[in-house]
Image (cartoon, grey):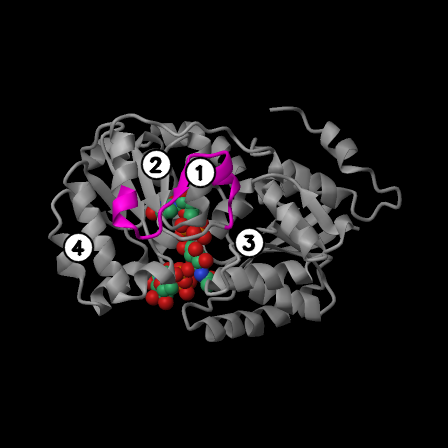
């Protein structure tokens, strides 16, 4: 009998993570029956549907259409809508990815119905409980039966929390599978011409963390930082809808629009956005995924946060933590403008084969003679 799996995705970074997983599960369609559940946490075309089109993700089998809300309301709405789905389908496994409210809500529902849970991107910790994502990560990991980890710090964190060794699988970074698969299409994107940009002659910004955008004071500081940078190099800023709404609430739209050299645009699809990252001189961000993509693309990343749950991007990659410290940010920008790169290497298993590792583990999940990971991984060809 086929193993029925509910694959959950709700927000922009989730779609990018499930694409390779669904493609790999399809290869073994005599063994697995995946059912794709979109929670509806993100719903604008540019935050959702465009990723399905570009990354060839099948249309969701079920859309819970929960939409936006406060932390508790959104989580509760997803739980309420997901419970009958799990009860109707009685899956063997629920797969959740990342650290958004959809991840936590669906893991909680599955756990209470005694359904196995796999968490892709387990073990990451910022150790900052003021971030909703950190709470989502800790609770989801605690409930999960398969903890698929993207970087070695995640293994250490999970062991430290006493989660059993037999549940922890260091499989690498699934976002990099998507990046590698789509590199030819990214290279074909005409976004630079459309925006009148030259390679290595502009910077790129994304910001959406509550710590940066919810307070007017932080947004004013950000406007000052971007103004100084834009006086030296053009800044392209695709604005997340959360931030766009808050700019209106804070009455700061005009302040941002008046900054010369700063171009604010709508959120971009995956291919255009990654093309902009790949050809930029540097990226300023508070995103999780972008810290990882810049490391692989070897583009300097200035993370406008005090901490990161992805420390390998600092230890090995191109990432530097900046907070909102204007002096520090400008010093680093000047270094980059004078072509002083940070030496970097690509982390282990960020090689485009993470979905293969995950599915091979799931294929052996029921067998009595559980092979070691080394044996499973030996069957996956080297990069
Ligand atoms: C969520 C995740 C965050 C992730 C980010 C990816 C949580 C707690 N946060 O943050 O970890 O990094 O997604 O982008 O799950 N909105 C729209 N259209 C949309 C979606 C949202 O206008 O399609 C607006 C709404 O006003 C909404 C606000 O953005 O209230 C915030 O959306 P929400 O999904 O709650 O959180 P994000 O900030 O997007
Ligand atoms: N991204 C995109 N278009 C944009 C901004 C980001 O396609 O305009 C991609 C980005 O390359 C990465 C993912 O969205 O793959 C990250 O999403 P986000 O920053 O919203 O979430 P986080 O990773 O912080 O949870």
Mark 1 CB near ligand 2 (8 Å cut): yes
Mark 2 CB near ligand 2 (8 Å cut): yes
Q: Which residue is mark 2?
A: 277
Q: Which residue is mark 4?
A: 256
Residue 370 is situated, as x and y percent measured from the top left of the image, at: 84, 42
Q: Residues within 10 Å of mark 1 (few under 14, many from 20)?
A: many
Residue 236 is situated, as x and y percent measured from the top left of the image, at: 24, 42
Is tag 1's residue or tag 3's residue first in the polypeptide sequence?
3
In the orientation shown, which residue stands out farthest toward the right?
Answer: 368
Check contact, mark 2 vs mark 1: CB within 8 A.
Answer: yes
Identify the residue at image location x=45%, y=45%.
289
Is tag 3's residue or tag 2's residue first in the polypeptide sequence?
3
Q: Which residue is mark 3?
A: 125
Q: Which residue is mark 1?
A: 293
Q: Which one is in front in this view, the residue at disc 3 or the one at disc 4?
A: 3
Where 136 sits versus 289, above or below?
Answer: below
Q: Which residues are magenta?
A: 309-329
């Amino acid at each position: 009998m086929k193993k029925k799996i509910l694959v959950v995705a709700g927000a922009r970074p989730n779609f990018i993570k499930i694409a390779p997983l669904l493609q790999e599960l399809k290869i073994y369609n005599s063994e697995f029956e995946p059912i794709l559940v979109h929670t509806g946490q993100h719903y604008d075309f540019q935050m959702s549907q465009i990723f399905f089109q570009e990354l060839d993700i099948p249309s969701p089998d079920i859309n819970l259409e929960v939409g936006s809300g406060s932390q508790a309301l959104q989580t509760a709405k997803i739980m309420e809508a997901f419970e009958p789905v799990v009860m109707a389908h009685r899956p063997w496994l629920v797969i959740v990815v990342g650290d958004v409210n959809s991840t936590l809500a669906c893991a909680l529902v599955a756990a209470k119905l005694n359904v196995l849970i796999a968490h892709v991107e387990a073990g990451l910790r910022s150790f900052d409980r003021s971030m909703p994502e950190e709470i989502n990560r800790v609770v989801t990991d605690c409930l999960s039966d398969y903890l698929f980890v993207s970087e070695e710090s995640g293994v250490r964190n999970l062991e430290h929390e006493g989660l059993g060794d037999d549940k922890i699988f260091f499989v690498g970074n699934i976002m990099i599978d998507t990046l590698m698969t789509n590199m030819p299409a990214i290279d074909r994107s005409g976004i630079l011409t459309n925006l009148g940009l030259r390679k290595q002659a502009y910077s790129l910004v994304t910001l959406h963390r509550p710590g940066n955008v919810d307070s007017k004071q932080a947004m004013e500081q950000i406007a000052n930082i971007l103004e100084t940078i834009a006086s030296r190099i053009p800044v392209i800023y695709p604005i997340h809808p959360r931030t766009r709404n808050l700019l209106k609430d804070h009455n700061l739209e005009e302040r941002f629009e008046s900054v010369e050299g700063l171009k604010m645009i709508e959120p971009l699809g995956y291919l255009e956005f990654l093309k902009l990252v790949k050809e930029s001189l540097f990226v300023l961000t508070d995103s999780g995924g972008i810290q990882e993509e810049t490391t692989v693309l070897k583009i300097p990343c200035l993370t406008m946060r005090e901490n990161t749950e992805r420390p390998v991007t600092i230890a090995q990659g191109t990432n530097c933590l900046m907070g909102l410290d204007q002096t520090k940010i400008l010093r680093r920008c000047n270094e980059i403008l004078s072509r002083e790169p940070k030496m970097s290497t690509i982390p282990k298993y960020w090689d485009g084969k993470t979905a293969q590792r995950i599915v091979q583990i799931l294929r052996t999940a029921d067998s009595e003679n559980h092979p070691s990971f080394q044996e499973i991984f030996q069957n996956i060809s080297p990069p």
